[in-house]
Amino acid sequence: MPETVRNIFARQKWMAIAVATIVLAGILTAASPVFLTFSNIQSILVQSSVTAIMAIGMTFIILTAGIDISVGAILFFTSALFAQLMIDTESYLLAFTAAMVCATGLGALNGILVVRFRISPLITTLATYSIYRGAAIHLTGAQNIPVPRDMGFLGNGKLLGVPVPIIILALIFAIGVYAFSRTRFGVFTRAIGNSARSAQESNLPVNRITIAVYAASGLVTGIAALILLARVGGLQSGIGIGIEFTVIAAVILGGTKLTGGSGTVTGSVIGAVFLVLIDNGLNLMNASPYIYDIVRGSVLLAAVAVDRLSAIRQQKSVEAARAARIRGSAVAG
Amino acid sequence: MTSPTLASLKTYPAIPIIAALAVAFSLFSPYFLTSGNIEAMLGANAVVLIAAIGMTFVFLTGGIDLSISTVISASAVISGLVMAQTDNVPLGIGTAIAVGTIFGAVNGVLIGYFKLTPFITTMATQLIARGIAFVLSQGIAVKGTPYWVLDFGFMSWFGIPAVTLVGLGLVILSAAALGMTTWGRQVMLVGSNPNAARYTGINVRFIEFSVYLLAGVLAGIAGFISIANLGNAIPGVGDTLLLMIIGAVVLGGTAMTGGEGSVERTVLGVLLLAILTNGLNLVGIPFYDQLIIQGILIFVGAWLAMKFSGQRNA
Amino acid sequence: MLDTSKTAPPVLSVRNLSKAFAGKTVVDDVSFDIHPGETIGLVGENGAGKSTTKNMLCGLLQPSKGEILVGGEVVPQIDGPEHGISAVHQELSLFGSLTVAENMCITDLPGRPARVNWAEADRIAKAQLEFLGIEIDTKATIESLGAGRQQVVEIAKALLHADRVLILDEPTTSLTAIEREKLFAIIDTLKARGVAIIFISHFMEEIYRVCDKFIVLRDGKQVGGGHLADVPQRQLEEMMVGRTLEDSRIDLDPPGDAEALSVKGLTAIDFENVDFTVHKGEILGISGLMGAGRTEIAEAIFGLRPASGCVQVHGETVSPVTVQAMKDRRVCYVPEDRRTNGLFLNRPVRENLSAASILNFVRRSLRGVGFRGEKARAQEEVKARNISVPSIENRVSDLSGGNQQKVLLGRWLSTLPDILIFDEPTKGVDIGAKFDIHETIAGLARAGKAVIIVSSDLPELLHTTHRILVMRKGHMVGEFRREDYDSVKIISLAASAGNGSNRNA
C-alpha cells in the first residue's frame, strides 16, 4: 500500500508545487482571516489568470526543450492591434479575429524561424521580442489607447457568478490538459523534448510539432492579452514588460524541466497561482512592491537548486545499480 | 585558405556593415560626422560596452548571464546611496565593484560549482538584483551624486568622453587577459569542449566560476559609469540594456555556443549598434522602428556567425 | 509449435551482400538464409563488419552490392515494418520520461490523432509484455526502469511493428546475470513462436546458449558459418581471430626492472580490485570487451574518476589522485574518443597541441602571461609527428582522422611524460598513420618510458605489447606474456565465463 501512495506522489510532477502552494495558503490563512474566503480565492485566481493562461502555452514550448522570451511582446502586439482596430472600426468581431490570427501568426513565425534557421530558440525569440515590440509600438504611435467600456466585462465581469477570466482560464486549462494527455500532439511534444535523436529515429513530425507549440503559445497569449486589456481598461506603454520571466518561472516552479520532455500543464497553472500567492503574502506584510522581485527570484533559485539535488540523488542510484552489477558478476564468473 | 582580406572579414564580419552604415548616415544627415555627435554617441554607449565585455566572456564558455543588466542597476543604486551619504567617490566606486562582485560570485558558484543551468540561474539573480535596486531606491532616482562624478560624466579628451576611455581601458585589459594569459586560453578551450578541457587538466569549474565573476565585476563598474552618464543612479537603468548587450556580442560575432569569439569583436558589435541607434535617431527614425531593425539585425548576425563558424546551432 | 525445420522457406536471405564507404569495403560478400524459429549468431571482433551488416539488414543502410530476399522475393529496399524486420540497437531508441505504454505505441498510436485511446495502448503493451513473459508496469516511466527492463521494452516495441525477424545487437552489455537469463527465456519464447532471430554478440557462452547456427565475420568477410552443434568453441574463436600473429610484429626491447606505475586494489563503480604494475621500458596492453571497465580504469588512474585503492608512481603513493597530480608526476592519458574528450575541434592545431602543457611551449617573463614561442614549438611538434596540415592555425576539425589522432598524441607527448596511457590509440585511423603511431609508441618504450595501451583491437596489442592483461566485466581475469600470446585464448578469456561452460571443449 505505501508503495502505491509513493508511486502516485512520484508520478504527478505537480505534487511538489501543489504542496508548496497549500502550505503557503495555510500560512497566509493563519496570518489573515480574510484569506480563505470565497471572494478572496476568486480574486487570486483572477489575478493569476493572465500568467496562468500564458504558462499553459509556454509549458508545451519548454516541453520540447525550447523557449520563447518574446511572449511579452506578442502580448503587447496583440493588445495594440486590438485596441487600435477597436478605435478604427469599432467592430469587436474584426478586432478579435485579427488579434487572434495575429497572435497565432507571431507565435508560428517564432516556430518557423527556429525550425528553418536552427539558431537557438533563445536568440531567435530575443530577436523577435525586439521586432514584435517595436512593431507594436509603431502600430500605436507610442500612445496609450483606451478600450470601450463594455469590454470591461471580459476582465471584470461575471458569468453565472464566476468571474469571466476564471472561466476562460478553466476552458484553456481543460483544453491544455486534454491536448497534453489525450492527443498525439501531447505525446510527441514530450518525446521530442526528451530525446531529439530518438524522435528522429522514430520518424516523429518534429518540425511540425515545434512550429505548432510556438503557434499555440501565441494563440493563448493573444487571449491573455485581451483579458489583460479588459482588466486594465486600455493599452498602456508598460504592458507586458517582464511578463515572459514570470511565465517561465511559473512553468519551472510547476515542475517542468527546462531541458524538456518532462512536466505538466497542471503544474504550470499551480505555479502561476503560487506566484500570485507570494505577491499576496507580501502585500499582507505591507512589503514594498519592489520586494516582489527579490522574493520571486529567490524562490526560483531555491526551486532550481532542489531540482538539481534530486537529479544528483537519482544519478547516484543509477551508479549504485551499475556497481552492483559488477560486484554481482564476480560470483557469476 | 583564402586571401587575408577575406580571412579578416570572417573574423570581424561587423566591419563592412559599420563602414556601410557610417557612409550611409553621413550622407543622410549633416550632423552625423560632427565631433559633438560622435562624442555623445561614444559616451552614451560606454555602459553597454563595459557590460558587453563581461557578457562576451560568459558566451565564450557557452553560457549566458541575464543578470548583467540589473546588476548594473543594483550597483548603481547602492553606490549612489553610499556616495550620497558619504560624498566619498572612491568609496562609491569600490561599492559598485563590490556589489557586482557579489552577484558575479553567486552566479559563478551556482553555475560553475553547483552546475545549475545558466539561463534559469541568471534569470533568478536578475530578478533579485532588480528588486534590490528598486527597494533601496524606492523606485526613484537616487539624489545626491557628488559633483566630481557629474563632472566626470562631461569630461572628455581629444573628443573621446572619459567614460568611454574607461571602457576602452577595460577593453584593452580584458582583451589582453583573454588573448595573452593562460586563464584566457583556458576560457576558450573550456568553451570549445569542456570535456576535453577536463581531460587536459584544466579546472573547468573554476574557469566557469571566474567568467561569471568577471561579468559581475564589469557590471558593477558599468553601474558606476551609468551614474556619471545620467547624473543619478537610476534603478531602472539596466532594464532596457539586456537586449543591447546581447545584441552587441552576437552582432560582433561571438557565438553563444562557446569557444569562438573575442573582446575585439564585441567592441565592433557595440560600435555597430551605437552607430545604428545614433544614425537612426538623427535621421528621425523613431525608437520603436529601431527596435524592429535591431531585432532583425541580431537574428541575421546570429545566423551569419553560425554559418561562418560552421557550428550546428548558434 | 511451428515447424522450424529447414523445409519451410527462409524468411530472410542475403546473397553477396557488400558495403563500401568512400572506397573502403567494410562488408564483403556475405550470404546466408534464416528460417522462421531459427537463431543465427553473428560473431566477429570489433570492426569485423557486424554493425554494418546489421544496418543493411534492418534497412538503415543500402547495400553497395548484393541482394536481399524477403520470403523468397528480392526487395530493392528493406522497409522494417513492411517486411517484418526489426532491430534492437546497442543505443536504445526510447524516451526516458515517457511511460512504457507510450514508448511502445508512439509510432502507431491507437485511436485518432486528437483522441488517443490510452486504454487500448495499455492493453497492447501489456499483451506484448505478457507474450514475452515479462511483467513490467506499463505506466512506469522508462527512466525508472533498470537497463534490463528498458531493453525488454525496446524488444517488445520492436516486435510490435515487425515480428518475423528480430535483430539483437550486443543485447547483454548492460544486463545483470539475472536479466540476461530473462532475456534468454524471452528469446526461447520467440523461437517457439516462429520468430527468426539474428543475435550479435561477443560472448561465446551466449552464442552457444541462444543460437542454432552461426556466421563468423573477419575484416568484413564471411569466414565461416554453420551449425553450432558441429563446432567446438575454440574453433569458433579461431575463425574470429585468424592466425595473423606472425606477421608485422614490432621489434621491442626487453623492459627494465624499475617499477613505473603500480595499481593495487583499485575499485570503482565499473571495476573491482584491479592490481597490476608497469615497468620502465615496458608496454602493457589491457584487452577486453566493451563494458569490461578498461577505459574506466585508465581514467581512474589519471584522476578523472573517483576510485578507492592505491596508485603508485615510481614507488610513491599518489594521494589524492588528481589530473594535476598525475601530470606533475609525468603521467599522461590520451583518451579514447578524440572528438568528445580529446580535441578542441573549432580551435587551431596550435592550441590543441599546447593544451596540456602550455609552459612547455612558451617563454614567459611574467607568470601566466604571454605565448611567445608557441608557434615555433607547435611547428616543431607538427613536424615530429608527421602531421599533414597546411598551417598550425587551421582548425583541427579540418584534419583527417589520422592527423587528428596525431595532434592528440603530440599534445600529450609535449608534456614530456615518463608514463603514458593510451586508450584506443589507432581507432578510426588509416594504415599509414597507424604504423606511425605504433612506431612512436615502440620508440617511447625503447627510450625507457612505461606505456599502457587500452585497446579492443587485439592484433594491435599482440604486435606492440610485452604483456597483455585481460578484463572481463570489471575484473582482471588473465595475464599473458609476449612469448605466450595466444589470440584465441585471450578472446576466450575476455568473452566467456571460464572453461566450465564450453561445449565441445
Image (spheres, coloured by chain):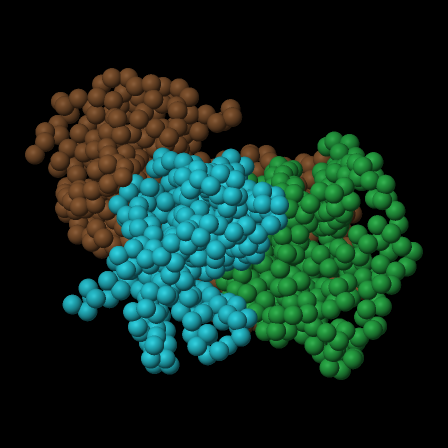
- Give the number of marks: 0
Chain drawn in cyan: A
Q: Is residue C428 visible?
A: no
Q: Is residue A223 above or below residue C62?
A: below
For image coordinates 42% across by 21% down, the residue present is C64
Residue C27, quarter of picture: top left
Front position in the image: A315 or B110: B110
Of residues C138 and B34, the one nearer the viewer is B34
Q: Position of residue C129 (x, y in %)?
A: 18, 46
Can you say whether C145 is above or below A20 in the image? above
Residue at image coords 28%, 17%: C74
| Lateral position of residue B259 relative to residue A148, left or right | right
Q: Say which residue appears at 48% left-offset and 57% top-offset.
A: A232
Q: Residue at x 25, y 22 (%)?
A: C70
Along the horizontal axis of the image, is B297 left or right of A118? right
Quarter that holds the N terminus of chain C: top left
Nearer to me, A77 or C326: A77
Chain coloured brown: which letter? C
| Image location (x, y in percent) of residue B102 | 63, 72
Q: Quadrant of residue A332?
A: bottom left
- Asked whether residue B161 appears in the rendered view, the answer is yes
Q: For the C terminus of chain C, which image quadrant?
A: top left
Palette colour of chain B? green
Q: Is residue C292 left or right of residue C206?
A: right
Residue B71 position within the rendered picture, expressed as x and y whole percent measured from the top left: 63, 66
Location of residue B77 in the rendering, given as x and y in whole percent from the top left corner: 67, 71
Outermost residue toward the left in this view? C1
Q: Is residue C154 left or right of residue B221?
A: left
